[in-house]
Image: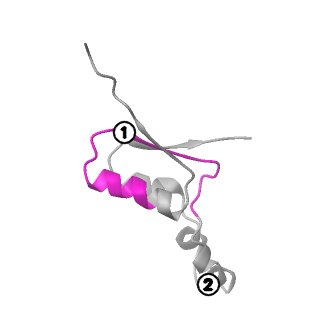
Amino acid sequence: MNSPVYQTVIVSGGFAELFTALHLAHEHYSRSVILIDKDQRFCFKPLLYEYFDGEMYTSQVVPHFWNYLKVVESSLCKIECNR
């Protein structure tokens, strides 16, 4: 009998969750990883002051999730949840 193949689902796209998804990909984790978040962008909140002060660009402080996920294996994906 075949054993089921489970996927790893990470809910929320915060710093720890994004780091976990990227770490699993870099460690060649054998299962697919699904990152679920309501937003399309990750916000580096400690850098918001620099952004509003004009020292940094939007793409540096609030990058799109795909900027991180496209550089790792395609088993990582982003799903947008609408309320």
- As drawn, the label of residue 43 is none
Percent position of residue 18, x then y:
47, 58
Percent position of residue 38, x then y:
64, 48
Q: Which residue is mark 2?
A: 50
Q: Is residue 47 left or right of residue 4?
A: right
- As drawn, the label of residue 32 is 1
Q: What residue is shown at x 64% (from left), y 78% (from top)?
A: 48
Q: Amino acid at mark 2?
A: Glu
Q: Is residue 20 magenta?
A: yes
Counting residues from the start of the chain, the first of labels 2 and 1 encountered is 1
Quick check: 12 above or below 81? Answer: below
Q: What residue is shown at x 70% (from left), y 41% (from top)?
A: 82
Q: Which residues are magenta?
A: 19-42
Check disc 2 and report its element: helix, strand or loop: helix
Quick check: 8 above or below 23? Answer: above
Q: What residue is shown at x 55% (from left), y 55% (from top)?
A: 13
Percent position of residue 68, x then y:
43, 58
Q: Specify few, some or many for label 1: CA neighbours under 10 Å numbering under 14, 14-19, or 20 or more.
A: some
Label 2 with label 1: CB-CB less than 8 Å: no
- From mark 2 to mark 1, how far is it between C-alphas? 36 Å
Determine the residue located farthest toward the right in the rendered image: 83
Q: Amino acid at mark 1?
A: Ser
- The quadrant the N terminus occupies is top left
Disc count in the image? 2
Quick check: 22 above or below 81? Answer: below
